[in-house]
Image (cartoon, rainbow, N blue to C red):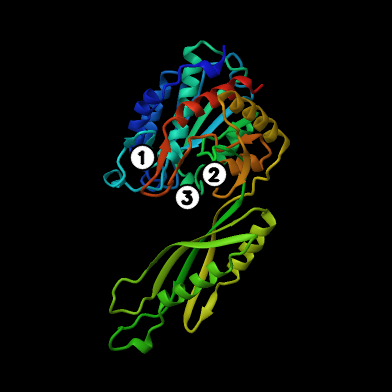
Amino acid sequence: MDPLKLPFDADEMLAGLRPWIECESPTHDAAAVDRMMDLAAYDLAQMAEIERIPGRMGFGGCLRARFPHPKQGEPGILILGHMDTVHPVGTLAKLPFKREGDICYGPGIMDMKGGNYAAVDAVRQLLRAGAETPLPVTVLFTPDEEVGTPSTRELIEAEAARNKYVLVPEPSHQDGGATIGRYAIARFNLVAEGQPSHAGARLSEGRSAIAMMARKLLEIEGMTGDDCTFSVGVVNGGQWVNCVSSLCEGQALSMAKRQEDLDDGVARMLALAGEENGVEFRITRGVTRPVWEPDQPGTMAMFDIAKDIAGDLGFELKGASAGGGSDGNFTGAMGIPTLDGLGVRGNGLHTLTEHIQVDSLPERGKLLAALLMRLT
């Protein structure tokens, strides 16, 4: 049986994917993420043994699916994806599911519901054809990747440790390439605490937390260099315009290609804490993704197989390390052969122009199906 000849159909795949996209599932809305897991569970229940794992820390739950196999329980292949998105409920009004030629728009369609669906369809097509993969296959969908995976990292690492290989259908690179390593990432929580006063009658008596945060924001982003980047993505402060702000909070992100560069960046960030002119500035470290070093032998052996498959599909599959974390950081850092970026082609992820190339759905379905058949 040649998996490249399986009848993947772009229109049928898009029709199956549409309910997933129209079920908005922002990370911090646990009920919304659980509704998305319900849809995926229904689709997978026709093929696999389903397990729902309750959420914790205020996040939604996980979905684990194990497919029938004579070697069930032995180390196999883990397909790892997340169902949470950055788009709040209501985004569909601005970014509806809409196809225009070979482009289809929708919140989370590229990152990463499109890739998840292609992976599910790959298994579905193999089962329909009566094909038996050399190794047992497990799918794990998680609810909190977009905020650094604070509630499910241990679960992911435990599941990965039971398997020989990990496939991550996160979006592909712009050229359709796969990810063979990822940069290290650290998050930080920022707090400035000042002294309130009436902004009109007693301005000089106040100490502005917002002003402190503004100064620190510029200082943080000014530390960006070739080895380590710094950015502040969230700032919230003040309650009344006629009151000098006593509290301002923010969140920052740092990313580096090497773990030692990230560790140095973390030290520089934490050193910014202190008190100036009656305003205290505090920094606490949030969740961290370890560096996944590229060129690991197991990963490269998988990549060579994927590259051969891509050649048979008519395109050159390139491999590169990537910025922007994924749960592949954890499994790759564990030394488990991991191939990431196997999902759909597209652009605009995390924005109101997020879209995919429709013809990449069957392309990635065939690539994943062939990988499942060739990994031993």
Residue identified by numbered label 3:
147
Which quadrant does the N terminus fall into? top right
Give the answer, above or below, for where 102 lies relative to 87: above
**In x, y percent, where is residue 244?**
35, 79
**In x, y percent, where is residue 178?**
58, 37
Q: Distance between the Cα atoms at labels 2 and 3?
A: 10 Å
Give the answer, above or below, for where 248 lies relative to 94: below
Identify the residue shown where x is 40% and y is 29%: 40
Q: Quadrant of residue 12?
A: top left
**In x, y percent, where is residue 179?**
60, 40
Q: Secondary structure at mark 3?
A: helix
Dot in front, 3 or 1: 1
Residue found at the far left of this picture: 93
Q: Distance between the Cα atoms at labels 1 and 2?
A: 22 Å
Residue 63 in view of the camera: no
Q: Nearer the viewer, residue 242 or 303?
A: 303
Give the answer, above or below, for where 82 lies relative to 68: below
Type of the residue with mark 1? Tyr
Identify the residue shown where x is 65% and y is 28%: 164
Residue identified by numbered label 1:
105
Circles 3 and 1: CB distance less than 8 Å? no
Q: Earlier in the sequence, mark 3 or mark 1?
A: 1
Q: Secondary structure at mark 1?
A: strand
Residue identified by numbered label 2:
326
Q: Earlier in the sequence, mark 2 or mark 3?
A: 3
Label 3 Cα neighbours within 10 Å, binned few <14 / some 14-19 / many ≥20: some
Label 2 Cα neighbours within 10 Å, binned few <14 / some 14-19 / many ≥20: many
Dot in front, 2 or 3: 2
Identify the residue shown where x is 66% and y is 63%: 264
